[in-house]
Each structure stands twice: as structure tokens, then as C-alpha cells.
Image (cartoon, rainbow, N blue to C red):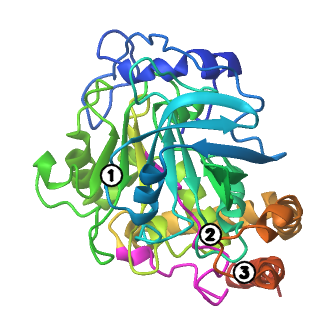
């Protein structure tokens, strides 16, 4: 896996134009899935907004977001009455005014009419003449509707981020038209910009894996028809319009997976083992190894290696958020999809899987996870306490810190026992 970062100046000044990556020039090793060496193209500059007061995902602060928009437009977001239509708005972020941005509701289970902590997206470059802000085209503002700790997602992304590419996250205090809405989590989207921060350019194909039913296996090969998989359940986020890579890499990938001996030829094994280690430590009930099967996560096809890389997304159902016991078996749920089932079928991969978990626990000790939880709690406590729209009382928020830390301790102990690391 190519785990590299671009120079900060490039990330802020140039990467916003990566949507125009084309098929000329460039190169890389011949791909088993594309049959060529990838592609390249120009990266035209896009119009830039004023400079932000701080990096958009600066974890050292609780950011201040003040959204101003037509009252009826905001109510339509709370009511989720106009679908994914972009509404005009302006936003002041940490004191810097950003005019004519686009806003729409987002979320999965939390996206229901009347949710006063509705998640939403802000898009800086949606309307004519508008450009990126702080090096980003979009930002995801999550309501943390049903997490009493209001930190599980950020804490889980911290764990994943020590092991592999993961979205940045921070917290923000939000007002809309002068009215306090409460504490929200800011999340980095997976797109051309964030992918380019971690992988060698030119960028390849990016998919959000969203099975229609929890029991569906999005990694099962059905036929060679691309339309069988794209856009459902393989939702394209960087596709043929923005890269030389075609969606035909998906059926080729799934067909290769059907032969367990071909697994390493099409899967970035380092990325996979890192993801599974992060999922084991945080005990996610969502994502690639969800409680009922593969759920919401991302896959990125790297044209430089010709392999797919799994990427974490939306790990809020972690650290016992749904009342799970911390003694979940290491092999639990791996058999639910054709991608991770190979880890059970091949002893060499299973040994590598267990070693990666042990290495991850050594690299991210329990004390580190608990200290991170303490730091997040201390930072957001004031904003959480004044949040008028959260569905749980302040004493539950305060208690949740202990709950998260105790669960982490019990999970580490269970993993150590299962791996034979303790007598």
C-alpha cells in the first residue's frame, strides 16, 4: 500500500482540481485488473476561498460554525422533505465568512424527519464561481444523534488513523440563524482530495460499498457485467469521469476473489489487515465486518499497485455503543462476505491477521486509547453540556466517558486472552 502525504501547500492550493484527472500520460505497474499502467492528466487550479483561521479538522480546538440560510430551507433539512437538493447558505467558520455554500442533509439511520441533530454536508464549490475552502470541497457535519459519549466516531478514527489512511475528524459548536444547535462532529469525506493525501497520483477509482440488505454479500461474483455492481452496491465516488480507470475493475476484482489463491494479487493485504485490526480493537458493528454482514465502508482501487484498498468510514457503532459485550470472537463475522472469508479459509492469512492485531495493540496501548478519550471529553464537555438538542442528559454524557474507557479495557483484555498474550 502506498501510504504517502503530499506537501501541505499542494494539498491546499492544487488538489482541489484533481476532479479533472484524465487518461493521458502517467504510468505505473501494469494492473492485473486494468491491463494497463493507469493514467494521468492535468490538475487545473480552482478558485480558492479566503484562508481559514485554522485547519478545518484541527483537533486542538472545538470549532465554531455559524450557518445562515433561509429559515424554510433549514426546516426542510430538519424535515428531510426535499431529498438531496443543495440549498444556498453562508457559513462563518472560526470567524471566517464563507459565502454561497451549498447544504443538504446526510446520514443513514439518523436521517429521519424531525431529527433536531440532523447530519448534513456543506459543499463549498457547488455553485458557479465558488471554490474550495481550506483545501476542501466538502465537509461532513455529523449530529451524533444516538451516541451518548459524542466521541466514539472520533476515537475510533484515531485508532484507525494510527494504522492506515483514515478520515480526519474534529468537533464543532453549531449555530443556525443565530440559534444554538449543539455539538457536532466534523468529518473528512473520502474524495479526490483526501485520497490524494494518502496515495500516489494520479488517483484511481473510489467506491462506497452500500449493500441494500445486511445479508447481501457485495463481494460475491455474479457475472462480468459491470452494471450488476455499479452503482449498487458499489457506489462510485471517483469514477470514469474523473480518472482513466473504468468501473470494469469491480467485476474483475470480484472474479479474482472467487479464487482464494488470487487474493493478494487484487487486495492490498497490508490495508486489509490494518483495517481488520482496527475493527477488532474498536469492536465495530458496522463497516466491512458489520454485526449482520458487510455494511457501509469504502474501497479504493490504486492504479499504481493494481489492488483495492479498504478504507474505514463512519465508525460510530464502536466501543460498545449498542450494548455489545467486549468479548466478541476474533473470527466473528469474517465469514459473512467473500472478501474477509478468505482470511478464515487460508491459515497463512489467518496467522497474519492475528499478528496484525497483536502488533496494533502494542503500537496503540490501552493507555493511549483511554488518554485520547479523556482529552476529547475535556475538550467537548462544555459544548456537550450546553447542547439543547441532544437526546440524553448531561450526567449520561459524563458517565459515557467511563463506559467507553471501561469497554476499551475489557476489549483489550479479551483480545490479549484470545491471542494467547496473557497466561
Total numbered circles: 3
Mark pair 1, 2: CA separation: 21 Å
Left or right of 71 on screen, residue 128 = left
Crowd tier of the residue under label 3, counting other residues whose Cα lies within 10 Å: few below 14, some 14–19, many 20 or above = many
Crowd tier of the residue under label 2, counting other residues whose Cα lies within 10 Å: few below 14, some 14–19, many 20 or above = some
Per the rendered image, the range of residues in magenta is 309-336
Q: Position of residue 124 (x, y in %)?
A: 51, 31
* Residue carrying label 3: 411
Marked residue nearer the N-terminal end (3 or 2): 2
By secondary structure, the bulk of the magenta-drawn segment is best described as loop
Q: Which mark is residue 185?
A: none
* Residue carrying label 1: 262
Mark pair 3, 2: CA separation: 15 Å
Can you tell which quarter of the image residue 244 is in? top left
**Residue at (14%, 61%) from the top-left corner?**
222
Describe the element under mark 1 as helix, strand or loop. Answer: helix
> Can residue 196 be seen?
no
- For the C terminus, the quadrant is bottom right
Can you tell which quarter of the image residue 50 is in? top right
* Residue carrying label 2: 354
Q: Position of residue 417 (x, y in %)?
A: 74, 85
Amino acid at each position: 500500500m502506498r501510504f504517502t502525504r503530499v506537501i501541505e501547500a499542494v494539498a491546499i492550493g492544487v488538489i482541489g482540481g484533481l476532479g479533472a484527472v484524465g487518461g493521458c500520460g502517467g504510468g505505473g505497474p501494469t494492473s492485473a485488473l486494468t491491463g494497463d499502467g493507469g493514467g494521468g492528466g492535468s490538475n487545473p487550479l480552482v478558485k480558492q476561498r479566503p484562508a481559514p483561521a485554522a485547519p478545518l479538522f484541527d483537533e486542538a480546538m472545538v470549532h465554531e460554525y455559524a450557518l445562515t440560510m433561509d429559515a424554510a430551507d433549514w426546516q426542510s433539512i430538519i424535515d428531510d422533505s426535499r431529498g438531496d437538493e443543495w440549498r444556498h447558505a453562508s457559513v462563518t467558520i472560526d470567524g471566517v465568512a464563507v459565502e454561497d455554500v451549498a447544504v443538504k442533509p446526510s446520514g443513514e439511520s439518523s436521517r429521519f424527519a424531525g431529527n433536531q441533530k440532523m447530519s448534513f454536508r456543506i459543499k463549498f464549490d457547488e455553485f458557479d464561481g465558488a471554490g474550495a475552502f481550506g483545501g476542501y470541497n466538502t465537509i461532513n457535519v455529523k449530529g451524533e444523534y444516538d451516541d451518548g459519549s459524542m466521541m466514539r466516531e472520533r476515537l475510533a478514527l484515531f485508532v484507525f488513523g494510527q494504522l492506515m489512511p483514515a478520515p480526519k475528524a474534529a468537533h464543532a459548536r453549531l449555530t443556525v440563524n443565530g440559534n444554538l444547535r449543539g455539538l457536532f462532529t466534523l468529518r473528512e469525506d473520502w474524495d479526490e482530495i483526501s485520497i490524494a493525501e494518502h496515495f500516489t497520483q494520479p488517483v484511481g477509482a473510489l467506491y462506497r460499498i452500500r449493500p441494500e440488505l445486511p445479508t447481501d454479500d457485495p463481494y460475491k461474483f455474479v457475472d462480468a457485467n459491470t452494471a450488476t455492481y455499479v452503482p449498487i452496491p458499489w457506489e462510485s465516488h471517483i469514477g470514469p469521469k474523473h480518472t482513466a480507470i473504468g468501473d470494469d475493475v469491480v467485476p474483475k476484482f470480484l472474479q479474482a476473489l472467487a479464487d482464494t489463491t488470487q487474493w493478494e494479487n487484487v487486495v492490498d493485504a497490508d490495508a486489509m489487515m490494518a483495517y481488520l485490526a482496527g475493527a477488532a480493537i474498536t469492536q465495530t458493528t458496522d463497516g466491512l465486518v458489520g454485526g449482520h454482514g458487510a455494511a457501509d465502508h469504502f474501497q479504493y482501487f490504486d492504479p499504481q499497485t493494481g489492488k483495492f484498498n479498504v478504507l474505514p468510514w463512519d465508525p460510530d457503532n464502536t466501543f460498545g455503543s449498542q450494548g455489545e459485550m467486549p468479548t466478541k470472537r476474533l473470527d466473528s463475522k469474517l465469514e459473512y462476505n467473500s472478501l474477509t472469508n478468505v482470511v478464515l479459509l487460508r491459515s497463512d492469512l489467518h496467522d497474519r491477521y492475528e499478528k496484525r492485531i497483536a502488533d496494533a495493540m502494542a503500537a496503540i496501548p490501552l493507555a493511549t486509547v483511554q488518554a485520547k478519550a479523556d482529552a476529547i471529553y475535556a475538550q467537548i464537555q462544555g459544548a456537550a453540556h450546553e447542547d439543547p438538542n441532544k437526546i440524553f442528559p448531561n450526567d449520561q454524557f459524563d458517565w459515557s466517558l467511563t463506559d467507553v474507557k471501561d469497554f476499551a479495557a475489557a476489549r483489550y483484555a479479551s483480545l490479549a486472552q484470545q491471542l494467547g498474550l496473557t497466561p
